[in-house]
Image: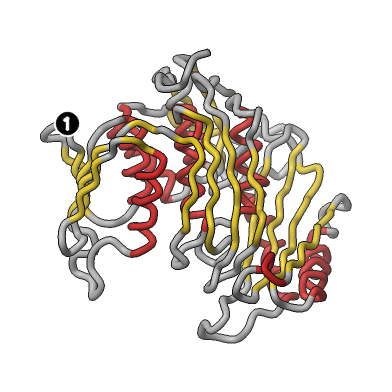
Amino acid sequence: MASHHSHVLTYEGGNFLRQRLGLATLSSRPVKIKKIRHKDANPGVQDFEASFIRLLDKITNGSRIEVNETGTTVYYQPGLLHGGQIEHDCNEQRAVGYYLEALVCLAPFTKAPLHATLRGVTNDQVDVSVDYLKATCLPLLQQFGLVANLDLRITKRGAAPGGGGEVVFTCPNPRKLRPVKITDFGKIKRIRGWAFATRVSPQTANRVVESARGVLNRCLTDVYIYSDHRKGPQGGKSPGFGLTLVAETTTGMMLGSEVVSRPQGSEGNPTVPEDLGRGAAKLLLEEIYRGGCVDSVNQSVALLFMALGDQDVSKVVLGPLSPYTIQFLRHLQDFFKVMFKIETLKPDEDSELCTGAEKIQLTCIGVGYTNLSKKTS
């Protein structure tokens, strides 16, 4: 819930903190968030959220951040997005993906090209993994004109709860983003995957691969899954294994899924590699059924870059909107006064193809956001 009594946007509750602070930074509008978990036994901003606020402070210059004694109210007045070389130790309560998702949205608008080194948990059961973002989000960014020096590398893996992983993210900073028309989904032509295993037997990753292929090979022959076994310092501090799958279409669209084993010391039975592989394959088939030209995790990134693009029409076809994306559309209207035209696409009655869930087309005119802080040579 937002109120607009002054130029300061005021919200209540701790949900969608990353969205609010990230959009405040891009729009240069101060934001005040009240009643953050004020009725919980452990009230206020949590450690992982405080770590995220510190990360924002590192990539901006001149930001003013005030948190009250109980941590239930945060006032954030954003500074200029500076970028450059930064290093950050992420809190182990959340994976590196939690912080990377926000960095991906801010990185194209920094003064200097971003070169960020993040340390912490690379794969857990809560947040999107680094493998997933590399396989699905980076190709999406390239469609908006972010091509040169765009990279995401995993130098060390770290499973939950101990972490110990390290990733390096580099991103260019163009003057402006180009408008897009991402409407042709195409057909699935191949499936690729990455099975990782840290501080467990190398055979574990092979078992995951075999069980996933058992499901996917019934639908498609072009299935290739890489194994990534890490040990010693490269394998982090905790044992774990998982699988990331990505389906690529004939038009270059990427849809993905992932499953990670239970963290060491958690309640419940230990994860069986065969069950994990089958689970990831079924989740990928479910994501393909939802369809759309952008997977459900990256919907908000596509909509943000469409809204901030050049003053021209941009279109994208998506599957069912996730609750996170629906709230993101509301926040885009609050911060940038951008509204999308949403149309439900009716399936082609003449086509014999099963197109899955209902698709929607979102259209908007970009605000013409220009990176004014970028140095000109």
Residue 194 rendering spot, x and y as whole percentages: 74, 58
Let me know if residue 242 appears in the view: no
Instruction: Name the residue nearer the viewer: 183 or 108.
Output: 108
Instruction: Name the residue nearer the viewer: 346 or 127.
Output: 127
Position of 355 with respect to 263 (left or right) is right
Position of 160 with respect to 21 (left or right) is right
Q: Is residue 76 above or below residue 162?
A: above
Identify which residue is drawn at 71% across, 50% down: 246
Let me know if residue 168 appears in the view: yes
Toward the right, the furthest residue is 221
Q: Three-letter amino acid code at disc 1?
A: His
Q: Is label 1 in a helix, a strand or a loop?
A: loop
Residue 254 rendering spot, x and y as whole percentages: 68, 42
Q: Is residue 60 above or below residue 180?
A: below
Identify which residue is drawn at 21% across, 61% down: 71
For residue 347, what is the image quadrant? top right
Please rate how many residues cluster around mark 1, counting C-alpha atoms within 10 Å: few if below 14, some from 14 to 19, many from 20: few
Residue 55 rendering spot, x and y as whole percentages: 40, 49
Position of 356 with respect to 87 (left or right) is right
Q: Is residue 326 above or below residue 308?
A: below
